[in-house]
Image (cartoon, helix red, strand yellow):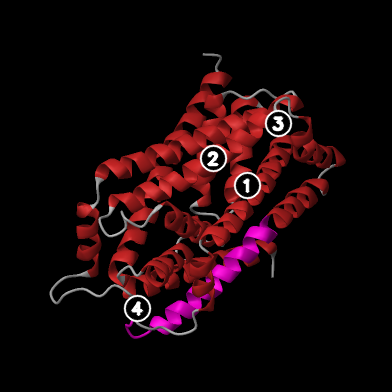
Amino acid sequence: MSNKAVNVLKYIVMLGVTGTLLWISFQNIEVAEGESKREFIGKAWVSADKLYLMLSAIAAVLSHVVRAERWKLLLKPLNHPLSLRDGFISVMVGYFINLAIPRGGEVSRCYTLYRLNKTPVDISIGTVVAERVIDLIFLLLLIGTSFLVQLDNLLYFFGKINLDETAPSEEGGSMTLFIGVALFALGLFFVIYYVYKSHRYFTLKLLSKSRKAFKGVKSGVLVIFRLDSKVNFILYSLLIWVLYYLMSYFILMAFPETSTIGLLAALTIFVIGGIAMAIPLPGGAGSYHVLVPLGLVILYGLEQDIAVAYTFILHGWQTAIIILFGALSLFLSQYYRNKSEHGK
């Protein structure tokens, strides 16, 4: 079987898994007679405080701006200056492509940057790998912090092997729990394994083309040790994750049922969601919709129906932001490229 056929098969399987997990999560919504599940989610959306939803959107966009600014720091010592505009456009195109092709955003982000300012792809890919290493460290720190401050709850989450009065009681709930725990473990594995796999994939693929390409990736990865301002790099990295957390927290605040959950509990749900997003499914769809409701139900006693509706809205809202700014960035990348080529 050719590599192309294998990739197509993998993509079909991935979409099948995503669809199955979404269906399982959707089926966990129980509604009153005469009311559809879509209507239930629609009512949850109407009840949401739109101010908090807008604050969540602002936090999301700011996190991408800060990521672009941090990317500038990495490319500067490599003599490839980056404007905030080109960096932000490239980052958003990467997130946009990730919705369709998991992990494909890293490559498309670098190719978009090359089209905008001719930064060599091998160099920029190396800096993206370096970013992922730092992001992994911060995510592991968040997981560790969450375990420290919410240890009892998380141990309960991991050790839950049957459903009692604190968990959903509908038929099929045990299967949902089993899938959720399996996904959590799988997501944690991908968090740790992803950086290694990314580095290996990029370097081996580029090395097969030329030694020069390999040197470019190596320079991009090691540039972190040559930064002019390591303090700013750390601060930007911290700010990115604070904004990620606020993005999730503001949506929790938007719903009456979750508005009193508290800052530390929101951190635990954020970590669970972060691990769900690490599973290579389009935009984390499916894994996110199973794990986050389980966390809300098992750890904090939220009604299953509300938990699922909240998760669909949270993920849908975040995805809508990426689609909006990603599609706009894709258009702008073509516009600025044409403008540069024609010298206008």
Q: Nearer the viewer, mark 3 or mark 1?
A: 3
Q: Which residue is mark 4?
A: 168
Q: Secondary structure at mark 2?
A: helix
Q: Secondary structure at mark 1?
A: helix
Q: Which residue is mark 2?
A: 240
Q: Nearer the viewer, residue 220 or 168?
A: 168
Q: CA distance from mark 1 to mark 2?
A: 9 Å
Give the image location of residue 176, x and y in percent: 43, 78
User: Which residue is at a point 32% across and 40% down the rendered structure image?
Assistant: 54
Please indicate, yes or no, whether residue 119 appears anywhere in the rendered image. no
Q: Amino acid at mark 3?
A: Lys
Evaluate if marks 3 and 1 touch, with contact meaning CB atoms under 8 Å apart. no
Q: Is residue 317 left or right of residue 270?
A: left
Q: CA distance from mark 4 to mark 2?
A: 34 Å
Q: Where the N terminus falls, by quadrant?
A: bottom right
Image-based side of 254 in relation to 234, left or right: left
Q: Which residue is mark 3?
A: 230
Regarding mark 3 in the picture, which secondary structure is present there? helix
Q: Amino acid at mark 2?
A: Ile
Disc 1 designates what residue?
135
Counting residues from the N terminus, which is met first, the one under dot 4 or under dot 1?
Answer: 1
Q: Please, what is the dominant secondary structure of the magenta stretch?
A: helix
Query: Which mark sits nearer the N-terminus, 3 or 4?
Result: 4
Pointer 3 and pointer 4: residues touching (CB < 8 Å)? Answer: no
The answer to whether marks 1 and 2 mark residues whose Cβ atoms lie closer than 8 Å is yes
| Magenta segment includes 182 | yes
Q: Which residues are magenta?
A: 166-194
